[in-house]
Amino acid sequence: MSAFVAAIGAGDAPVSLPDACVAALAVPGAQPARTMAVAGFACAVAPTRRRESGVRHDGDVVVVGDVRIDARAELMSALRAAPAGDARAPIPVDGDDLALVLAAYAAWREGAFGRLIGDFAFVLWDGGARRAWAVRDGMGV
């Protein structure tokens, strides 16, 4: 698992993470932590070799965390069959599990979290709804 931090603000301005929080994620000799800030939300994730760790966004929705989705084929099939809502995140085909979380959230909102199988811990910010979700797998690995 990688390390990440997220901060949520009460206003509409971008939130800034304290330098100490970002510095605490630093790994000696590695690149600095990746950060992102949008209205009401900021996050950072420590560099890692696992490609599914990081930050992704689609419009007003941002996800940061460490995610490995199992049963990908079944989840992607269910996403293809889901009715297209007002906005639909593209279904990733390149193994990007964070993007798959975004696509599932776009299709089913918070109902998506119960459909995810694998090892994961992430924070998802929906700027349009001004809601944050902290989610981890049932085993807490």
Image (spheres, grey):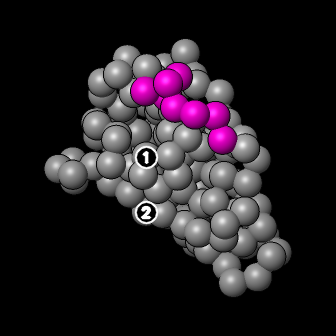
Q: Which residue is mark 1?
A: 112
Q: Quadrant of residue 17?
A: bottom right
Snapshot quadrant of residue 92: top right
Q: SS for tag 1? A: helix
Instruction: Give the class, few, some or many, for how many residues have Cα within 10 Å of label 2's Cα (few <14, many ≥20).
Output: few
- Residue 82 is covered by the magenta coloring: yes
Distance from Cα at disc 2 to Cα at disc 1: 13 Å
For this rendering, which residue is in front, 61 or 8? 61
Residue 130 falls within the magenta-colored stretch: no
Of callouts 2 and 1, which one flags the residue occurring earlier in the amino acid sequence? 1
Instruction: Look at the image and give the residue range highlighted in magenta.
Output: 78-85
- Farthest residue in the front direction? 83
Checking the image for residue 134, the label placed there is 2
Spot occupied by residue 47 in the image (x, y as percentages of width and height): 52, 41
Q: Amino acid at mark 1?
A: Ala
Figure check: 24 above or below 52: below
Q: Is residue 58 above or below residue 110?
A: above
